[in-house]
Amino acid sequence: MPGRTIAIGDIHGCSLALNALLDAIAPAAEDTIVALGDYIDRGPDSRGVVDTLLRLAEHCRVVALCGNHEEMMLSVLDNTMSYSGWLRYGGVETLDSYGFAGDLDVIPAAHREFFDNLEDSYETATHFFAHAAYDPGYPLEQQSPEVLRWHSLRESVPPPHPSGKIAVVGHTAQKDGEILDLGHLICIDTYCYGGAWLTALDVGNGVLWQADQRGVLRS
């Protein structure tokens, strides 16, 4: 029996919400969990989120995409961006979760490896997964990282991709806590760190799970 493909939206340090969703989903070995990026920043426990995803990868397939917040963090770690830009967008909370006291070596090697190996996108026969959006003018395998990680749906919503695949994205927070389902595009960033929900979506059957920052499931 084929496994499920389940996407999880922007976690932003909300480890209690993530663990509550995973308890409810109960991933099996044959399942694929596609995490859409933005694991870190803004919420209280970025380190705990990464720990959870690393443990999860021991039990099922985990496809972890790179969000714009991971891009900022990696630029700081690689000395190609100053701290200031990242810190304004939640880097303070991430560093606090690692017990930062001036030395970035506080980030464990396994976590650095996790960040270094994040994917730009992921495809199945029916769906295309990215952190933020896509450009309909290019094949899915030729999408630019800038569009995949940074494009806001508030600026513009792309039309259906010529591939016919349904896009599943995050990044553009739906502050009412409801997913944005346009048929050809589904946005599941439902603003957990801001007081709404963390969302997981089984793309095969449309089943949704949601939990808040406290780890309470939405009934």
Image (cartoon, rainbow, N blue to C red):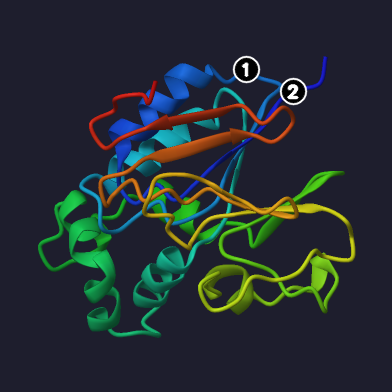
Residue drawn 62% across the image and 76% down it: 147
Residue 217: percent from left, percent from top: 36, 24
Number of the label disc, if any, that sits on residue 28: 1
Is the residue 86 above or below the residue 103 in the image?
A: below
User: Between marks 1 and 2, how big is the CA–CA gap?
Assistant: 8 Å
Is residue 81 toward the left or the right of residue 37 in the image?
Answer: left
Residue 45: percent from left, percent from top: 24, 44
Q: Are marks 1 and 2 in contact (CB under 8 Å)?
A: yes
Is the residue 69 above or below the residue 1 in the image?
A: below
Residue 128: percent from left, percent from top: 74, 53
Number of the label disc, if any, that sits on residue 127: none
Q: Which one is earlier in the sequence, the residue at label 1 or at label 2?
A: 2
Query: Quick one: 191 or 28, which is closer to the camera?
Result: 191
Q: Secondary structure at mark 1?
A: loop
Quickly name the residue at label 2: 3
Is residue 62 toward the left or the right of residue 115 in the image?
Answer: right
Residue drawn 46% across the image and 68% down it: 68
